[in-house]
Image: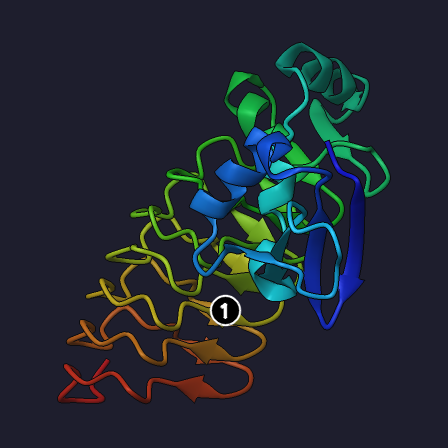
């Protein structure tokens, strides 16, 4: 579908031959990502060549979610990494299985899954059901604006856990263990910290959660900084 695909000015730019041939995938991408737009490239002679440009930070794994491979293909790949001695699936970083594709089949697996790399949830996700049981890298479901619950999140995360700018109302379902930072900042519907891990080796950040009214349920131990600034409904540090 793509005539050209480049990094430029920290943006993704896609050039199509003619306006009429704009791929449906681009139209869908424009609808999925806030701030996406289609504009004209004034430097080109052909006035019918549209430019689709998105800030690099807004694209991340959304492209990945638009081009999911066949479910049977993903299942076949996953089955190759079943370890009968451990009775677990161990998915290496170089497996070729994307986070988005794995989410489509994760609920069909009857054994625990260890994901050895980083795991990024697509921003159009509405649930974390199907995530691996353990992620050795970082886990991110940032800007999943339709995500209302952390139910289904990994039980253990090796480094950082990010659920920034989601629609969650509590931290119930959050990992039991996080090896690095835990960030749930700017979740404007978050009212409670109940469900947060008991111990955080890195920093804990609930900055900008304007509906948060209590710190009850906060971690008992935080190895680095604890941030709760810009929580305008918070009237006490008890908890």
Count the marks. 1
User: Which part of the image, by quadrant, shows the C terminus?
Assistant: bottom left
- Depth check: 119 or 46 in front? 46
Q: In which quarter of the image is residue 72?
A: top right
Residue at the image point whose x is 75% and y is 59% from the top: 44
> Is residue 7 depicted above or below 128 in this figure?
below
**Where does residue 54 sit, x and y in percent of width and height?**
59, 59
- Depth check: 85 or 2 in front? 2
- Depth check: 135 or 119 in front? 119
- In the image, farthest residue toward the right: 94
**Where does residue 174 sit, x and y in percent of width and height?**
41, 53
Q: Is residue 38 visible?
A: yes
Q: Can residue 136 be seen in this view?
A: no
Q: Mark 1 points at which residue?
A: 182
> Is residue 184 depicted above or below 148 in this figure?
below
Residue at the image point whose x is 51% and y is 30% from the top: 130
**Where does residue 234 sit, x and y in percent of width and height?**
17, 84
Residue at the image point whose x is 66% and y is 15% from the top: 70
> Is residue 138 depicted above or below 61 in this figure?
below
Q: Is residue 209 left or right of residue 112?
A: left
Q: Is residue 173 left or right of residue 111?
A: left
């Amino acid at each position: 579908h793509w005539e050209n695909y480049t990094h430029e000015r920290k943006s993704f730019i896609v050039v199509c031959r003619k306006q009429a041939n704009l791929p449906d995938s681009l139209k869908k991408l424009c609808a999925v990502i806030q701030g996406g737009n289609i504009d004209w490239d004034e430097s080109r002679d052909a006035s019918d060549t549209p430019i689709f440009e998105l800030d690099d930070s807004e694209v991340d794994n959304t492209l990945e979610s638009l081009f999911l491979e066949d479910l049977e293909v993903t299942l076949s790949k996953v089955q190759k990494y079943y370890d009968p001695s451990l009775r677990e699936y161990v998915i290496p970083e170089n497996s070729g299985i994307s986070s988005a594709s794995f989410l489509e089949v994760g609920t069909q697996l009857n054994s625990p899954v260890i994901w050895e790399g980083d795991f990024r949830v697509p921003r159009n996700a509405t649930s974390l059901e199907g995530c691996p049981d353990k992620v050795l890298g970082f886990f991110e479901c940032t800007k999943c604006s339709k995500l209302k619950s952390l139910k289904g999140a990994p039980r253990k995360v090796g480094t950082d856990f990010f659920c920034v700018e989601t629609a969650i109302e509590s931290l119930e379902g959050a990992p039991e263990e996080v090896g690095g930072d835990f960030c749930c900042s700017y979740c404007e519907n978050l009212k409670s910290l109940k469900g947060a891990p008991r111990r955080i080796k890195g920093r804990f950040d609930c900055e900008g959660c304007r509906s948060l009214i209590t710190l009850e349920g906060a971690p008992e131990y935080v190895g680095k900084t604890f941030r709760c600034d810009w929580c305008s409904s918070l009237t006490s540090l008890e908890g």
